[in-house]
Amino acid sequence: MMCPIEIGEQSELLAYSGRKLELSRAVALERHLESCSACREFVEGQRTVWQALDAWQTPPVAGDFDGRLFRRMEQEPAEWWNRWLRSALLRPGLPLAAAACLVVAVGLILERPDAPPEPQPTSQVQNLQPEQVENAFDDMKMLSDFTRAARTDAGEL
Ligand SMILES: [Zn+2]
């Protein structure tokens, strides 16, 4: 038998460790394990993981958990949103990204041509869409580059 680790085929070792390998292949692998310390270590490591997972017991969820959660969200929705918004805005780098986003949004609004006085045929709107999408992608790329550059600068300080 070729060593599964040497040929980079560890699926058989994983199946064996999980006791999902068919008997004939398991026997062949056990013969290989007697002479290969690398595979033996791999299987022992996997068995340790399996044993830990078998022994792991999750604490029982309180019977009325969902009900209490929803009641609490109903009681204080504004506070819940405030906390979420505050934690989202206090992340490092986000205010800068939000400001950049605002600049791009204002730029897009200013760049947009004035609304035509009469409704235009649908074909014209469809002709404009790919270009608008392309511009949006360019803006997103620029914003992403800007955010990355800003983070790099902040990291170097
Ligand atoms: Zn081996």
Image (cartoon, grey):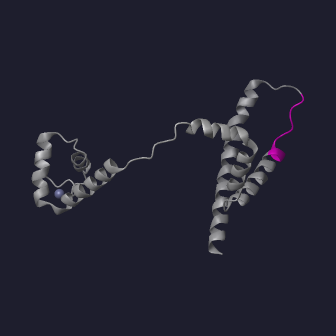
29 horizontally vs 13: left or right: left
Assess whether residue 113 is covered by the magenta stretch. yes
Q: For the view shown, which residue lies furthest in the right direction? A: 117
Main SS type for the magenta part?
A: loop
Q: Is residue 2 visible?
A: yes
118 horizontally vs 59: left or right: right
Rendering coords of residue 53 (x, y %):
34, 49
User: In the image shown, does 77 or 134 lie closer to the viewer?
Assistant: 77
Rendering coords of residue 126 (x, y %):
71, 30
Q: Which segment is the magenta one?
A: 109-117
In terms of image quarters, where does ligand 1 lie?
bottom left
Q: Is residue 131 visible?
A: no
Q: Which residue is found at the position 72% from the left and 40% from the top?
A: 75
In the rendered image, the quadrant that contains the C terminus is bottom right
Rendering coords of residue 107 (x, y %):
80, 50
Assess whether residue 59 is covered by the magenta stretch. no
Quadrant position of residue 37: bottom left
Q: Which residue is found at the position 20% from the left and 58% from the top?
A: 39
